[in-house]
């Protein structure tokens, strides 16, 4: 209906404080209360949120807002108009200067006094000021009391690894063909039948080696990339004894079904926001928080698999400094219940630059991704982890004020509120 990625880009380019009004935790809280009060089906919340964002970035016009809501929700015009008035007064009036008076004009046209929402507008302004103070406090650098100089806030799939020179693989070091073939078979088999076992590992070096060989073989063997995704999508390991809810029907919570539902909803070009939203959707509502952590790691791993080709097409220099295919450091730290100081035994820096010459750069990533879609037709309990903590780790990868940071922070707040009840 609307180009979501385009809306995200425009939201992040909004001037302050308009961006704050659009993406603040208070705004999300008001959305939630408003949708609940109006009895909007939960599976329509995200669409309405996008509609509101589209109006703020001036991608969607105010004109006939009630008809747009009626279209989305399937409601009659009278009921849709009531919700439209509440949305305009509760969410859009606060940034009416930016909207050039369109919010106030809409309310007056609907014979609604804008002053009715004055207290809520003031409440939003105050809440946003407090949020900004909170995020500023969170971004202050903590005192470094460890010998290890890496980033203290490690994304589930990203961490800055400072490797000593003697740890780097020399270019002349060559991995024997038989060892490479054994590693290849081991990885393919693990992804199809025993992927959850690696999530139990507390050995950071073992996980780092898994990352290294996965990337190394991926660059050298075009067929390997197809086998990796094909086998992961065929994995029938259960991440929970509970079921996923798919179209109001229960479905076994396997790695395969989890990934296929995620792809069905978001396609292959997904991001952390999509993952956070998916884990809060009706599909995963039966999963416990610890099971959602496993789901989060699997989804991020799959997302990163879809990024590798794009990085390789543009040479190794294009790989983000913190990129890691599998959540090696965070998983080891979470499973062991402590912050590990073990430095990884391998990293992208170890990959031989010469091997890039063997990559067929005429292969378009989208074509390979299309092949993966065609091919896509024991409960693990981490010892010291909860979903809010995992999302807090993810949060640190985004700058203050960004849409991603605010959305993930909103989900953290919701989870912590639920824990207190």
Image (tube, helix red, strand yellow):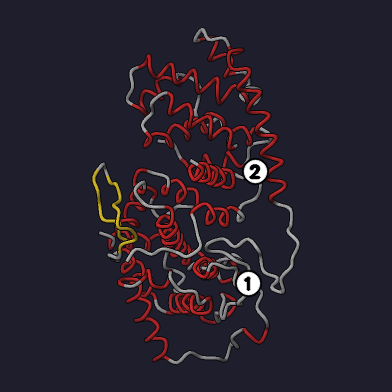
Split into 4 quadrants, where in the image is the N terminus?
top left
Task: Give the farthest residue toward the right.
Answer: 143
Q: Which mark is residue 189?
A: none
Q: Earlier in the sequence, mark 1 or mark 2?
A: 1
Q: Which one is nearer the viewer's eye here, 212 or 11?
A: 212
Circle 1 SS class: loop
Q: Quadrant of residue 329?
A: bottom right
In this rendering, the answer to whether 107 lies above or below 232 is: above
> At x 57% / y 19%, what residue is drawn?
103
Asked if residue 365 can be seen in this view, the reply is: no
**In the figure, is residue 193 to the left or right of 209?**
left
In this rendering, the answer to whether 184 lies above or below 36 is: below
Q: Which one is nearer the viewer's eye here, 7 or 294?
A: 294
Q: Which mark is residue 161?
A: 1
Image mark count: 2
Q: Quadrant of residue 116?
A: top right
Residue 63 drawn at (x, y percent): 48, 19
Q: CA distance from mark 1 to mark 2?
A: 26 Å
Q: Which one is nearer the viewer's eye here, 91 or 342?
A: 342
> At x 66% / y 34%, what residue is drawn?
128
Residue receiving disc 2: 401
Asked if residue 242 can be seen in this view, the reply is: yes
> At x 45% / y 57%, what residue is drawn?
293
Residue 318 drawn at (x, y percent): 58, 66
Circle 2 SS class: loop
Residue 230 drawn at (x, y percent): 31, 67
Residue 125 drawn at (x, y percent): 67, 28
In this rendering, the answer to whether 155 lies above or below 130 is: below
Disc 2 crowd rating (10 Å Cα; few below 14, some 14-19, many 20+) is some
């Amino acid at each position: 209906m609307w180009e979501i990625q385009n809306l995200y880009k425009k939201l992040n380019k909004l001037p302050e404080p308009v961006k704050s009004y659009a993406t603040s935790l208070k705004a999300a809280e008001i959305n939630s209360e408003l949708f609940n009060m109006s009895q909007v089906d939960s599976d329509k919340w995200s669409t309405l949120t996008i509609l509101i964002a589209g109006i703020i970035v001036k991608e969607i016009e105010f004109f006939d807002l009630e008809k747009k809501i009626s279209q989305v929700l399937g409601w009659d015009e009278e009921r849709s108009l009531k919700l439209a008035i509440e949305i305009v007064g509760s969410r859009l009036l606060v940034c009416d200067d930016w909207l050039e008076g369109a919010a106030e004009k809409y309310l007056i046209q609907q014979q609604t006094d804008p002053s009715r929402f004055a207290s809520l507008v003031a409440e939003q302004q105050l809440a946003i000021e407090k949020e900004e103070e909170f995020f500023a406090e969170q971004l202050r650098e903590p005192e470094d009391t460890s010998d290890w100089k890496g980033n203290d806030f490690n994304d589930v799939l990203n961490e800055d690894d400072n490797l000593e020179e003697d740890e780097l693989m020399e270019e002349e070091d060559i991995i024997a063909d038989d060892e490479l073939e054994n590693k290849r078979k081991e990885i393919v088999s693990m992804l199809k039948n025993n992927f959850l076992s690696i999530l139990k590992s507390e050995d950071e070096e073992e996980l780092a080696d898994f990352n290294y060989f996965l990337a190394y073989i991926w660059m050298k063997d075009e067929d390997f990339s197809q086998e990796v995704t094909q086998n992961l999508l065929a994995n029938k390991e259960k991440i929970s004894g509970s079921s996923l809810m798919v179209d109001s029907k229960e479905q076994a919570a396997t790695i395969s079904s989890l990934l296929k539902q995620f792809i069905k909803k978001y396609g292959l070009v997904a991001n952390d926001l999509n993952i956070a939203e998916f884990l809060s959707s009706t599909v995963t509502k039966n999963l416990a928080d610890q099971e959602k952590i496993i789901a989060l790691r699997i989804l991020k791993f799959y997302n990163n698999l879809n990024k590798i080709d794009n990085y390789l097409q543009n040479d190794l220099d294009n790989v983000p400094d913190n990129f890691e295919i599998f959540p090696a450091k965070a998983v080891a730290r979470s499973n062991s219940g402590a912050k590990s100081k073990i430095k990884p035994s391998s990293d992208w820096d170890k990959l031989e630059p010469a091997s890039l010459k063997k990559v067929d750069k005429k292969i378009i990533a989208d074509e390979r991704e299309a092949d993966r879609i065609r091919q896509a037709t024991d409960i693990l309990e981490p010892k010291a982890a909860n979903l809010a903590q995992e999302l807090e780790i993810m949060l640190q990868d985004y700058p203050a004020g960004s849409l991603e940071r605010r959305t993930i922070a909103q989900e953290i707040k919701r989870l912590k509120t639920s824990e207190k009840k």
